Image (cartoon, helix red, strand yellow):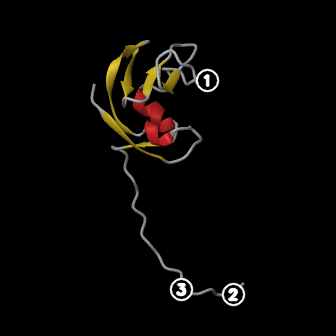
Amino acid sequence: YPTFEVTAQVGGNLGDGPARLGMYKFDKMYNGAAAYTNGKYIVFYGGARDGWQWNQGYNQWAGNGPALSAIADAEAFIKSKQFQLGTDEVKDYPTFEVTAQVGG
């Protein structure tokens, strides 16, 4: 199971964003899905009743997460919470300059 990096929170309202960033490595199989940790947070599948979770410990519940049938892995769950992965393509928008107001 390859490691992956969470590089930025780009939206949403999930708390403790900075602590959720960093390199995630495989921890163990949990309820039929690979669980990953960055040493502070664990992304794991809590089972059919709890769905995907992103907490500081196993068996902690943060609401009903999506089912494994809807989101297949930890990386996809992290992206669904509006965090960016190191493998994401980030668009580079060109800069521009406003030089004068015309009208209004």
Characterize the local packing of mark 2: few (<14), some (14-19) or many (20 or more) Cα atoms within 10 angstroms.
Answer: few
Whether residue 48 is situated above or below residue 12 in the rendered picture: above
Kind of residue at disc 2: Gly
Label count reads: 3
Place of residue 27 in the rendered image (x, y in percent of width and height, measured from the top left): 33, 21
- The residue depicted at 39 percent of the width and 53 percent of the height is 90
- Identify which residue, 7 or 60, lies in the foreground: 60
Say what secondary structure mark 1 lies in: loop
Q: Who is closer to the viewer here, 76 or 14?
A: 14
83 versus 2 height, above or below: below
Q: Which residue is mark 2?
A: 103
Q: Amino acid at mark 1?
A: Gly
10 Å crowding of disc 1: few (<14), some (14-19), many (20+): few
Dividing the picture into quadrants, the one containing residue 61 is top right
- Residue contact at pointers 1 and 2, CB within 8 angstroms: no
> Could you say whether the residue bearing mark 2 is in a helix, strand or loop?
loop
- Check disc 1 and report the residue beneath it: 63
In the image, farthest residue toward the right:
104
The structure residue drawn at horizontal position 41% and vertical position 30%, both measured from the top left corner, is 40
| Mark 1 vs 3, N-terminal side | 1
Circle number at residue 99: 3
Q: Is residue 29 above or below residue 102?
A: above
Q: Residue at x 51, y 24 (%)?
A: 53
Tell me the mark number nearer the camera, choosing from 1 and 3: 1
Q: Residue at x 56, y 38 (%)?
A: 15
